[in-house]
Amino acid sequence: MKRFSTLLLFLSLVALVNVSAQNQNSKPDTIGDDVVRVDTTLVSLPVRITDRHGKLLPGLKQGQFHIYEDGVEQEIAYFEPPAIANNASPDATQKPFTVALLLDVSDSTEFKLAQIQSAALAFINLLRPGDRVMVVAFDQRLQVLAEATNDRKVLREAIVRTRTGGGTSLYAALDSVINQRLSRATGRKAIVLLTDGVDTSSKGATAESTVRAAQASDATIYPVQYNTYGDFADNSSRETYGAGDFGAMAHQTKNGEPASEAYRRATLYLRLLADKTSGYFQYTDSIKNLSRSFERIAEQLREQYTLGYYPKNKTVDGAQRLIKVQVGLPKVTVRTRKSYIYKPR
């Protein structure tokens, strides 16, 4: 009997040790000082409110907002006003942005790399000092040149290190950033995507799969389509064509596809990414316009409210859920996501 009691005591001690080890191993992951919540899904919405003249309305309170998902009102669990209101200094208590800066350095950008680097350097200087930036370059490979950091020196060195290569795995790069990099980050997130939009070498990821991933993510995507169409020309003049001139000459991509078709599809794809995530698509054909595009993006990041809620409907069915945000004011324009796909974290 005594031996049996001793055995029970020994087994109980082993069980306590195992439970303690499991509890230590099940602690939530952390990134910096932020805790990643793995058991709940906070749907985060960027919201921009303007009056009938297009002027930003920065002083609204949480109680003035109402969020509806598939017609059912949701309880607002998180609210943050714009980072800058009427040119005032940012509130020190506001969470910084995590911005993934994706730079297409495929062979189609060979003649534009210096301009791209210059504009990217100027862009990071437009963000708030606490905002973190991840620098990712991609051709047929993906290179994370800098993990998310607010160290401007590290970011500048990363951008200067970019080099052009062959092929364009745009879909694969975007898929990796959404599902592997930004999915672990907390707080407000954005992707700034500088590319011509023509994918020639992705494996696994597709246009459709990345759009769905974007809808399940809480990152806002700002595509900037850089004009490289003229670089497909074989003539010595290397004429440059605007977005409306893609049918002017019968150039081909390296995959043998007419360049005009590839560019039309690319433009639709980038516009769709912006539309589904409440971002803003821009087309640029010069360094001056590219700098202006980055300025507009930095401005929009500062001007948006951030609202969050935990969906009442926990069903995982892969269907799009319609979102509507209303503000208790007349004659205002509300810009936010129109839908998303529920994906528990």
Image (spheres, rainbow, N blue to C red):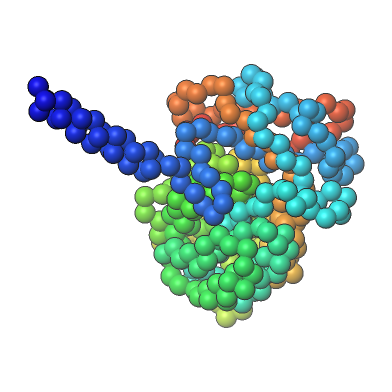
Which percent across, then down, holds residue 316?
45, 26
Q: Residue at x 58, y 67 (%)?
A: 228
Whether residue 290 is visible here, answered yes or no, is no
Q: Residue at x 14, y 30 (%)?
A: 7
Q: Residue furthest front?
A: 2
Which percent across, then down, holds residue 254?
43, 65
Res. 158 image quadrant? bottom right
In front of the other: 112 or 315: 315
Position of 260 relative to 337 (above/below)? below
The quadrant in which the N terminus is found is top left
Looking at the image, residue 91 sits to the left or right of residue 179; the answer is right
In front of the other: 223 or 132: 132
Q: Residue furthest right?
A: 53
Looking at the image, residue 1 sits to the left or right of residue 22; the answer is left
Q: Residue at x 45, y 72 (%)?
A: 165
Which percent across, then down, holds residue 62?
77, 32
Whether residue 130 is visible here, answered yes or no, is yes
Q: Residue furthest top?
A: 72
Q: Residue at x 52, y 66 (%)?
A: 146
Which percent across, then down, holds residue 253?
47, 63
Looking at the image, residue 163 sits to the left or right of residue 94; the answer is left
